[in-house]
Amino acid sequence: MDEKIENMLCRINLIKDSDPFNKRILNDAYETLQDTFEEMKRLRMHNNQLMNVIYQNQGMIEDGE
């Protein structure tokens, strides 16, 4: 998924300033996709950290402590 998004960002970046009719929407799309991609990476990292905490405490959870 990351590779597809990075590919899309590169492709939009190549054309966003060369198309005068669609420059604004392409710039908006580029910025929105970039922001969304960064948020996705942040949430993925946060999710991994939470899963690590769950795994570390799994014994306590199963024992009902």
Image: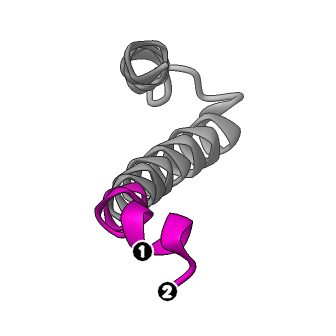
Q: Could you tell me what secondary structure mostly forms the magenta stretch?
A: helix
| Viewer-closest of 53 and 59 | 59
User: From what the image shows, is residue 33 above or below residue 14?
Assistant: below
56 to 65, vertically: above or below: above
Q: Is residue 5 above or below residue 29?
A: above
The residue tagged with tag 2: helix, strand or loop?
loop
Give residue 13's quadrant in the image. Answer: top left
Q: Is residue 45 left or right of residue 21?
A: left
Indicate the position of residue 28 as horizontal and vertical percent values: 62, 48
* Type of amino acid at the residue the image marks with label 1: Met
For the residues labelled 1 and 2, say whether their Cβ atoms are less than 8 Å apart: yes
Which label number is shown at residue 60?
1
What residue is pinned by disc 2? 65
Q: Is residue 36 magenta?
A: no
Find out whether residue 61 is within the magenta segment.
yes
- Residue 36, horizontal then vertical, whole percent: 55, 50
The one nearer the camera, 32 or 47, is: 47
Q: Locate residue 35, reporting x and y percent.
A: 48, 55
Q: Say if 45 sits above or below 61 in the image.
A: above
Q: Which residues are magenta?
A: 50-65
Which disc is residue 49 wearing? Answer: none
The first of marks 1 and 2 along the sequence is 1
Q: Which residue sits at x=43%, y=26%? A: 9
Other residues around mark 2 within 10 Å, as few (<14) / some (14–19) / many (≥20)? few
Calculate the distance from the C-alpha at mark 1 to the C-alpha at mark 2.
Answer: 5 Å
